Image (cartoon, rainbow, N blue to C red):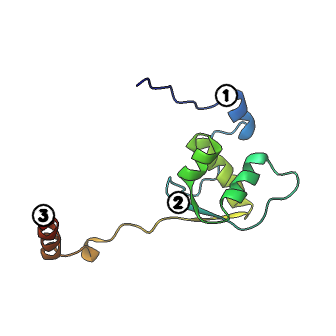
């Protein structure tokens, strides 16, 4: 099997898409942050912004948006930051991991392990 190099896109196109910016208003976006559109696309919007709004009619993870647009995560975060500042999307960060006190008891975990081994 021959592996192809990762295509990060034409640098000129990426420069144009982001308006030359290398950072945007990310607001703590990570790969699993869910993005939801708050409005429909309007005339004159950048094509990538339009596609994001269409994709995010239902909650969509940042990584899924990047894959669909075939753009690097950093570029997608800049685009999402633009839409977030404009109030066109909402970002829903995942719940933080459970605190130590919320973790299941070790006895329960042992019972689950024994049950799995018996399968």
Query: Which residue has dot 2 on it?
Result: 33
Please name whichever residue, 119 or 20, is drawn nearer the observer in this view of the structure. Answer: 119
Q: Residue at x 58, y 58 (%)?
A: 27
Q: Residue at x 78, y 47 (%)?
A: 47
Query: In which quadrant of the rendered view does residue 8 lie?
Result: top right
Is any part of residue 19 visible from this angle? Answer: no
Above or below residue 13? Residue 53 is below
State how far apart marks 3 and 1 are (Cα). Answer: 51 Å
Question: Residue 12, percent across and down?
Answer: 71, 28
Q: Which of disc 2 and disc 1 is earlier in sequence?
A: 1
Q: Which of disc 3 and disc 2 is earlier in sequence?
A: 2
From the image, which quarter does the C terminus lie in? Answer: bottom left
Residue at far front of view:
119
Query: Which residue has dot 1 on it?
Result: 10
User: 2 left or right of 6?
Assistant: left
User: 30 left or right of 26?
Assistant: left
User: 90 left or right of 96?
Assistant: right
Pointers 1 and 2 in contact (CB under 8 A)?
no
User: 86 left or right of 44?
Assistant: left
Query: Which residue has dot 3 on it?
Result: 117
Residue at disc 2, secondary structure: loop
Pointers 3 and 1 in contact (CB under 8 A)?
no
């Amino acid at each position: 099997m021959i592996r192809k190099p990762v295509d990060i896109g034409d640098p000129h196109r990426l420069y144009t898409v982001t308006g030359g910016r290398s950072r945007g208003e990310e607001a703590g976006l990570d790969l699993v942050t869910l993005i939801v559109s708050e409005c429909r696309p309007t005339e004159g919007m950048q094509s990538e912004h339009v596609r994001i709004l269409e994709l995010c009619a239902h909650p969509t993870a940042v990584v899924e948006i990047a894959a669909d647009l075939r753009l690097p995560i950093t570029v997608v975060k800049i685009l999402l930051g633009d839409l977030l500042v404009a109030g066109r999307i909402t970002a829903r960060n995942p719940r933080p991991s459970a605190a130590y006190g919320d973790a299941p008891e070790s006895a329960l975990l042992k019972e689950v392990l024994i049950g799995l081994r018996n399968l």
